[in-house]
Image (cartoon, rainbow, N blue to C red):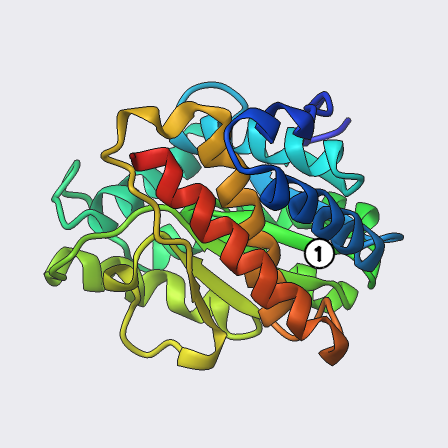
Amino acid sequence: MTRFEHVQVEAMDLHRFESVISSAQYSELLALIQRAAGRLRGRVIWNVNSTAKGGGVVELLRPLLGYSRGGGVDARWVVISGDSDFFVITKRLHNHLHGIDGDGGPLSADEHASYERTLAANAVELARLVRPSDVVILHDPQTAGLVGAVHATGATVIWRCHVGLDHDNVRAHEAWDFLAPYLRTVDACVFSRSAYMWEGLSPEKVQYAEADTACPEHRVGLLEAADQLELVLELGQSGALLDAGAHDLLVQLEAVGQELVQRRVE
């Protein structure tokens, strides 16, 4: 019996952006997306998280994957499963990454064992799906323990951390210490803000998706399109997806993404 939920996401029409950027930018955007889709042809971009309902990550993934699919990228979404103990531990990690006590429980060897036991079962199924040419984006603490299994398939593995705090504290360090061993073989880590980067991570493996999450329009498609372009850039810069000849494409994608980000907050 499968432990995964495969979330169906319909392709979204990129032409909706024709009315919010200049005609020249729109033409450039279509051309760039076509070229990027060509670079990614034959690869599946897997997004892995722990829920398909509720929360900011879900709000991000639906349009992110929708526009990716609308641009010709084979982007897919699977949801892992776990028991109540697993989600108590990952909620504790989530709270600690925000610097708060949460339930005040420990992150000891027992918690490591429970966390790893749950993810080991999910890893078996994930390994059956993933090919060496694929890219797997693991979201938040619930999935960090899958990095090693994905790396073993030969795929590119990226861990995307959506939570953090501007000024770290003891609780945040406890979460970092728990999760860091699972990230040793990751190809790249992506944080929402540069302030969220942990001590001890290799700077060359870290990318940032600086997002104005205070902006009330963050749910609209324009922001999600900018995030999608930024993510393509981050994947390319990880060094495992696109060859050196894609440098100019990535620079242009970044410029278009920044323009979209600017427009979303005006």
Q: Residue at x 11, y 60 (%)?
A: 167
- Which residue shows up at 54% across the image and 23% down it? 52
Viewed as shown, does residue 172 lie left or right of 53? Answer: left
Total residue callouts = 1
Neighbour tally class for label 1: few under 14, some 14-19, many 20 plus, Cα within 10 Å:
many
14 vs 162: above or below: above
Q: Nearer the viewer, residue 214 or 55?
A: 214
Task: List x then y, in percent, for residue 43.
Answer: 82, 53
Q: Quadrant of residue 242?
A: bottom right
At label 1, the amino acid type is Val
Q: Position of residue 88 (x, y in %)?
A: 33, 35
Residue 98 drawn above or below residue 180? above
Res 6 seen here? no
Above or below: residue 187 compared with residue 136: below
Q: Residue 35 falls in which quadrant of the image?
A: bottom right
**Quadrant position of the N terminus in the picture:** top right
In this orientation, which residue lies closer to the viewer: 114 or 99? 99
The quadrant of the image that shows the C terminus is top left
In the picture provided, is 252 more to the left or to the right than 6? left
What residue did someone put label 1 on?
135
The residue that appears at 47% across and 80% down in the rendered structure is 204
Q: Report the residue that reaches farthest toward the front.
A: 23
Q: Residue at x 74, y 54 (%)?
A: 36
Q: Is residue 208 visible?
A: yes
- Asked whether, in this view, residue 110 is left or right of residue 6, the answer is left
Task: From the top left corner, tell me how far across and down residue 62 is, in percent.
Answer: 57, 27
Q: Secondary structure at mark 1?
A: strand
